[in-house]
Amino acid sequence: MQITVKLYGSLCFGRFHSAVREYPDSSTIQTIVTDLGIPPDFLIRLKNGYHVPLEEVVENGDTVSLLPMLDGG
Amino acid sequence: MRILSQNPVTDPSTVLYRRCVVDLETGTASQEDVPCKNLEDVLGGFGRSYQILAERKITEAYCPENPLILNIGILTGSTVMTGLRAYFSSYSPLKQSRKGLPSAMWSAGSGNFGNKLKWTGLDEVIFENRSATPVYAVFSEGENGPQVEIKPAAHLLGLTGHEKIMTLHSEYKDAHFAVIGPAGENFNNVYMGAIVLSTDNQLKSGEGKSRFAGRGGMGSMMGYKNLIAIVARSSDKMGKITPDMRDVNRDVIKNGGSARFQPVSQGGHGGTWANIDVLQAFHAVPENNFRPKGDEDVAGLFRPNVEKDFDVHSEACFRCGIRCHNNLYHRNADGSRGALAAKFDFEPLILFGSNIGINDSRQVTELIHLCDYLGMDAISLGTTISYVLDYNARHPDQPLCDGVVFGQFDQIRELIVQTGRGKLSEIGRGVKRLSEQTGETSYAMHVKGLELPAYLPETNPAYAFAIAGGHMSMGTHMYLAKEGKTGLDDWVEVITRQGLLQVGYDMIGLCKFVGVGMGHELISRAISEATGLNVSSGEIVAAVRRAYLRGLALELRQGYEDDEYTLPGQVFENPNPNVTLPAFVTREFFAEMKLRVWAIFKPEMEGLLPE
Ligand code: SF4
């Protein structure tokens, strides 16, 4: 199935900003994070604009956004 | 600090800290070892200073009885990485209840000043009264203990904060400095004066790489006291790093919390600057006075775009491996690194950038630099200016400040100069007072009289419970963006549990960018390794909680009423459809949240203040 993956901030460096990628059925956010070699901690994960856990299953046509979890100061 | 036993919880009086009281009116000083009353005293910072402030009934900030307290945390000057913080506490000229009473405030800063003060042998200085003439104070290590001198400072007047530091450095090579800029000198018209702290990098390079204790007008308090600078002289006394301490420091660097602030080249996310990318994904980057437009105008401030114009270099405070500073340098014609342009942190970047309609990084750097040199709090200044620009957009026929509008760089630059030099009290006294004068308060971005940092109020209802600055004293400003949580239970829980613990860093002397909660074993390990004291994580959390609640109780004692625990009216009256995060902060939600938070806090606040 095809998933649009969007990366933000430093997660883009050496990767991409936005790409349509192929994943097997029943893939989760974790599958995508692992595939991209992104450490899973301190990550904001959105599916179609909504916050979701790493275990969230994705479906064909979904958009997954991954953002670094930062803080202020 | 003298530590006579290992258990500061059951027997805090066996830990004694060295206090110096300086009477600026007479120019005399006295010192004593003070036994700690509780664990908050032992940990230090605002946990200790607020207990001193609570003993005084102060009805106006600019009065001789209002002390300015300089202190450090238990880990300041230790070998724990980031352990270099100094704290300034007083009743604030800026933050004031509707009854007109000043609120207690503290402000924290890094650099190397806190270390040097610790190494003179002092843990705390209380500046009493005010000097009739401009002076600076010199604290030095002496053979028989810390020494104090009060010296004339007329030659420093009018200089920028950086110039004052470099002038003093030419005389005191073994020292670090806390000074005020022109803003603090003009305390009557500028209530948002910052204290400017020197860094090693600054003294070596001669460039303006200061750090700041900005919030709440502590620099203005110094100005009122006619105390233009503080010099801390000592040899470097950083102890030998033990193997266990090396492990602590390795964990500071390796824990995912601090990695977020480390340079991209080091595997981190590049400091707070990167917040702009995250928040823009939700169109939640403040633009035009905290009113995102739903467009991509802020992209000019994204790192890759800024790197086209500047050489961006990661730097650090004294011996800090987190290296969160993103310093921007001009490029010479041959491509080599030129002079420093500014330091890019999220707050000044946004508040002197998109929030005032400026998205050209060259212009933003100039405004940040100017604010720093004049010695003002970037948050209070930027947020008050954005109000002026917003007001003028709404009232083109009767504008404020010569009708400056969003995006007018030259005119905004002039506003900053005029404010910092004490010629524009409308801005210098902060947005609460200005909006009360104009009668248009709903888009004045402050809570309880302190200007908001660069996180939208509609994404953080917990601002109401921050006691010393929206994001420095309540760790919830990114909660919605990070977690997406909008439930009442979630917000009550985060405010009353994790959020308030943010203030713990302003007790112990470490930098928040260590990035772990106060209950993390890393904190108790660091204290144990640096001091030999045995304090459990639970005991640290309990002490931080008491200190926070004491601060909240002190607000109530200074006249704050329930309806002052609120957000700018615009949040409820006119939600911004451009922000794609959930719009959940209704009046009903907010009222219920407050009721539940107070129900938890109020019983615990009893007995925390002296009778
Ligand atoms: S994390 Fe940043 S601000 Fe904190 S001590 Fe290190 S370099 Fe300084």
Image (cartoon, helix red, strand yellow):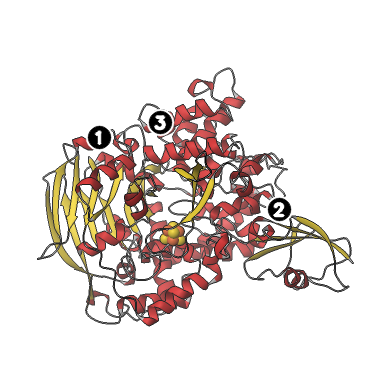
Q: Are marks 2 and 1 in contact (CB under 8 Å)?
A: no
User: Quarter-wise, where is residue B316 in the image?
Assistant: bottom left
Q: Earlier in the sequence, mark 2 or mark 1?
A: 1
Which chain is home to disc 1?
B
Ligand 1 quadrant assignment: bottom left
Residue at left 35%, top 30%? B422
Where does residue B142 sit, x and y in percent of width and height?
A: 12, 62
Q: Residue furthest front?
A: B334
Pointer 1 local density, CA inside 10 Å: few below 14, some 14–19, many at least 20: some
> Residue under circle 3?
B419
Residue B117 as seen in the image, left or right of residue A43: left
Where does residue B74 sit, x and y in percent of width and height?
A: 32, 68
Gap in Å between the C-alphas at discs 2 and 3? 37 Å
Gap in Å between the C-alphas at discs 2 and 1? 50 Å
> Residue under circle 1?
B157
Q: Amino acid at mark 3?
A: Thr
Q: Is residue B34 above or below residue B207?
A: below
User: Quarter-wise, where is residue B186 in the image?
Assistant: top left
Q: Are marks 2 and 3 in contact (CB under 8 Å)?
A: no
Residue at left 32%, top 79%? B533
User: Quarter-wise, where is residue B16 in the image?
Assistant: bottom left
Mark 2 or mark 1, whichever is nearer to me:
1
Which chain is home to disc 2?
B
- Element assignment for label 2: loop
Q: Amino acid at mark 2?
A: Pro
> Residue under circle 2?
B582
Q: Amino acid at mark 1?
A: Leu
Q: Earlier in the sequence, mark 2 or mark 3?
A: 3
Gap in Å between the C-alphas at discs 3 and 1? 17 Å
Mark 3 or mark 1, whichever is nearer to me:
1
- Element assignment for label 3: helix
| Residue B37 vs residue B254, the one in the foreground | B254
